[in-house]
Amino acid sequence: MHIIKPNIFKHFIPELFPKNLVNYIVGFVEFILGLGLYFTSTVKYASLGIFILLVLLLPIHIWDANKKRPAIGSKKLAIIRIPLQFLLMYGIYFVYIH
């Protein structure tokens, strides 16, 4: 979706970053890491990469939850997304160890 509909993500990216560039880079990284999950030889690396990406993007979700009008839509969704991020971290960690 980062490539197909980049405007969806522009409000998640802080103003100090070049929005299009960051959006495409994150989309490309997500795609490559997701693809890596399909091959047994790269599952460990891909899951570790996804875990690191989730950690790196966590401050963006916290920043969004603290905005007056969160990019995700409502304050409630923005707040729910933070513990969901930790659940995703646990899930990908589980993939990594198995």
Image (cartoon, rainbow, N blue to C red):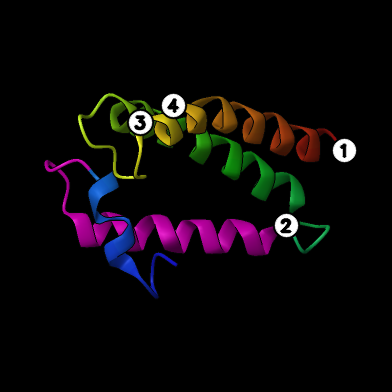
- Indicate the position of residue 37 as horizontal and vertical percent values: 72, 57
* Residue type at numbered disc 4: Ile
Tell me whether the residue at label 4 lies in contact with that at label 2, contact meaning CB atoms closer than 8 angstroms.
Answer: no
Circle 1 sits in a helix, a strand or a loop, which is it?
loop
| As drawn, 43 above or below 85 | below
Disc with the residue nearer the chain's start (4 vs 2): 2
On the image, numbered disc 4 is attached to which residue?
Answer: 79
Mark 3: which amino acid? Lys
Q: How many labels does the image show?
A: 4
In the rendered image, the residue lying farthest to the bottom is 4
Q: Nearer the viewer, mark 4 or mark 2?
A: 4
Of pointers 1 and 4, the one earlier in the residue sequence: 4
N-term mark: 2 or 1: 2
Q: Do the residues labelled 4 and 3 touch (CB within 8 Å)?
A: yes
Mark 4–mark 3 Cα distance, whole angstroms, equals: 6 Å
Between discs 1 and 3, the one toward the N terminus: 3
Residue 68 pos. (x, y %) = 20, 29
Q: Give the range drawn in magenta.
A: 14-37
Task: Tell me which corner region of the image, top left, top right, bottom left or bottom right, holds residue 90.
Answer: top right
Task: Name the secondary structure under disc 2.
Answer: loop
Return the residue at label 1.
98
- The type of residue carrying mark 2 is Leu
Which mark is drawn over residue 75?
Answer: 3
Residue under numbered circle 2: 37
Residue 4's place in the image compared with 88, above or below, is below
SS for dot 3: helix
In three-dimensional space, the C-alpha distance between marks 2 and 1, rounded to whole angstroms, equals 12 Å
